[in-house]
Image (cartoon, grey):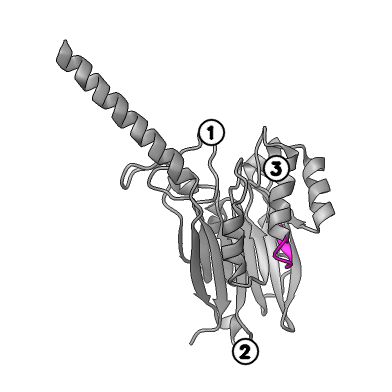
Amino acid sequence: MKLSVKIAGVLTVAAAAMTAKMYSTAKGNHLKTHTFSLSKMKGKPPLTIFFISDIHKRLIDQDLIQKARSHAPHLVIIGGDLAEGGVPSTRIEENIKRLVSFGVPVLFVWGNNDYEIRQHRLYSIFKAHGVISLRNESVSFSHSGHTIGIAGVDDIKMEMDHYEEAIKALDKSQLNILVCHNPEIHEQIHDTDGIDAIFSGHTHGGQIRFGKFGPYELGKTGRVKQSKYLISNGYGTTKVPFRLGAKPETHIVTLCAPE
């Protein structure tokens, strides 16, 4: 009987320690840096992007903003799931204020959890702070006299995506960036679409993983068709504020010409 009590006590302490570790991990502020060498950047100065996705309930840490600002990004991209149901509008707006504080264009694409928020409220916040939201459409961004196309595809899980509509106005000869919350967009692109870089989140890297095992793969960079891609673990969490084996992350991505 005493042995059983001791074992139960040890298991309780271990569970508490694991819970504390997962909670602490979920509150991390990791800024990863990447370099994408792209042939269309030849003759153009490097373009630096701060990418953040899956913020959910979190308030973006000011120290993280300062660290990202030191890289002097030319563009900020929010890759969806800015919020979710139950997140106060004041927190959503404060996060937007912190992102527009970079003083550069801020672009946003919808994630599935963004549909849990009153859409008119999101639009109101975006309009008030000059955030460019993309729903199956593209915009042109001028960088040191060069034009770059940025296409945003609406959320795939919610069946709001229309890839062909999003890219139809892109000039295939110029540098083109594709942003879609869900990395399943990789299955829709073709070699001839003129897409050079793809940014996604959604998976949280599995959020809670045991070694190699998790509901999704860890975030990563790679190549699909003719495009370099980034899939982020994301910054926040959903359902439970825990992470294990999949640290939260944000990104500084520099697009440059091959050496």
Asked whether disc 2 touches disc 1, contact meaning CB atoms under 8 Å apart, the reply is: no
Residue at point 55%, 45% (across, down): 236
Residues under labels 3 and 1: Cα distance?
Answer: 18 Å
Q: Which mark is residue 91?
A: 3
Q: Is residue 246 magenta?
A: no
Q: Identify the element where label 3 is drawn.
A: helix
**Horizontal side, residue 256 vs residue 154: left or right:** left
Amino acid beneath label 3? Arg
Q: Residues within 10 Å of mark 1 (few under 14, many from 20)?
A: few
The amino acid type found where label 1 is placed reads Lys
In the rendered image, residue 214, in percent from the top left (x then y), is placed at 38, 42
What is the distance, in whole Å, between disc 2 and disc 1 at their CAs? 46 Å
Dominant secondary-structure state across the stretch colored magenta: loop
Please tell me whether mark 1 sits on a helix, a strand or a loop. loop
Which numbered disc, 3 or 2, marks the residue that appears first in the sequence? 2
**What range is drawn magenta here?**
101-107
Q: Residue at x 54, y 38 (%)?
A: 238
The residue wearing badge 2 is 43
74 relative to 11, above or below: below
Q: Nearer the viewer, mark 2 or mark 1?
A: 1
Residue 192: x percent and y percent?
60, 71
Residue occupied by mark 1: 239
